[in-house]
Image (cartoon, helix red, strand yellow):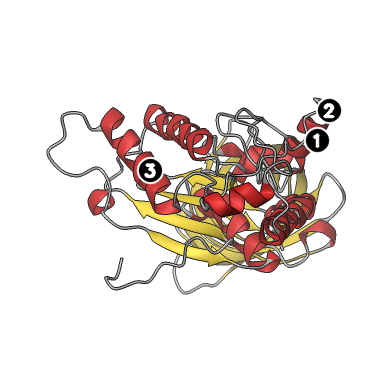
Amino acid sequence: MPWGLKRFQQTGNLHFLTFSCYKRRPNLGTPKSRSTFETALERVRKQYELCVYGYVVMPEHVHLLVSEPERGPLAKAMQSLKQGVARRLALRATDSFWLERYYDFNVWNHSKFVEKLCYIHRNPVERGLVERPEDWAWSSFRHYLNGDPGTVEIESHWTVRKRERAGISPTVRVRPPENPAQAKLERGTQRYVSSFPKICPLAWYSSSPVARRSYFRRIRMRRLLLVVGAVCLCASLALAQGKTSNAWTCPKPADAHSIEIGDKPGHAYSIDQITCTSTKGEIAGVREKEGTGTEFAEVTGNSMKGHGVFVETMANGDKIHFVYQFTATTKDGQMQSGSNKYQATSGAGKFKGIKSSGTCTGTAAADGSVNWSCTGTYSVP
């Protein structure tokens, strides 16, 4: 964090915050430590009456999207949060738990709100910790996805509906004016409620035009959250990506041709076509079904190498085209073991524009077929 960085707080904006563990150590690397942070965040939310719109707890840093507190400055709330977590997780540590400073970005419009919230939810995926945002339990994504209450109360359309069903509405609360003369003028027109529901983003409003504008500005932000949830979910689906782990069974080639070159014994060129059946695997939620490979190989004694094109048909009828390069060992003209590297070149339907790559290893079965086991990655726009 650069020194001399200016913070703009008490502006009425939301804030995208990032703070990191000391020397980027994975102090939040265990489920228990991440759950401890969530508990501390909920405590601070209630104590300082701030709204949490989104968060993610990573092994060595945290992202938050929050409002400014109704009780005290944001910096004080974050200090309480960081100190509370450090006391619980670093009782006997000699070094600091957190880096001293934190990053604070003012979120001033809807597009920035969507950008930061989606960044928060996709962070575990981009880091390779999980394949899908919903697989990471220590973030607000599950709440936006299906209303999961979780440890931390998230300010969203789900929460608004829950309050409406419970019959909870904002309670009028007017802060007593600091000026006694003003208090005398306003006496009889002011109502102060010392006990009120913890309603976010604003638990009360007054006759002050400034307070009313602040309240309704936040209400407008709340109404946009339904759209935000859909946008983030669509963004997650639009950027569908993950890892593949699949298996194939390929019988002996039905159509194969070999030509001896004649320069030395056992040196030949061959071309064959084979249809394989998927026994395990899916891409972007669609089961793999079958595929046809057409390949060219150079055979030298008991080894061969070559390349081919594999046209895969998915369970929904869409097709994906792959190219691959392979090496293998043979015995009596039959493949015994092999490996290949593959890459998707094109796709149709749901898989148009797919990017995928990986490796496979194969071993021969007693009936002459070959069982292939493949792993890789993919992304579908």
Q: Are marks 3 and 1 in contact (CB under 8 Å)?
A: no
The disc label shown at residue 364, or none: none
Helix, strand or loop status at disc 2: helix
Is residue 214 rendered to the left or right of residue 307?
A: right
Q: Which quarter of the picture shows residue 202?
A: top right
The numbered disc on residue 59 is 3
Q: Give the residue drawn at x 68%, y 67%.
A: 111
Q: Is residue 137 above or below residue 181?
A: above
Residue at 53% across, 49% down: 180
Residue 67 in view (yes/no):
no
Residue that extends furthest to the right in the rendered view of this protein:
317
Q: Position of residue 176 (x, y in %)?
A: 58, 44
* Contact, mark 1 vs mark 2 (Cβ under 8 Å): yes
Residue 255's place in the image compared with 288, above or below, is: below
Please name the residue that numbered disc 2 is placed on.
165
Q: CA distance from mark 1 to mark 2?
A: 6 Å
Q: Image quadrant for the C terminus?
A: bottom right
> Is residue 264 visible to us here?
yes
Q: Is residue 257 left or right of residue 300?
A: right
Q: Residues within 10 Å of mark 3 (few under 14, many from 20)?
A: many
Q: Which residue is mark 1?
A: 161
**In terms of secondary structure, where does tag 1 sit?**
helix
* Secondary structure at numbered mark 3: loop
Instruction: Tell me which amino acid carries mark 1.
Output: Arg
Residue 342 position in % (x across, y down)? 58, 60
- Which comes before the other along the chain, label 3 or label 1? 3
C-alpha separation, residue under disc 3 versus residue under disc 2: 37 Å
Q: Earlier in the sequence, mark 3 or mark 2?
A: 3
Cα–Cα gap, marks 3 and 1: 33 Å
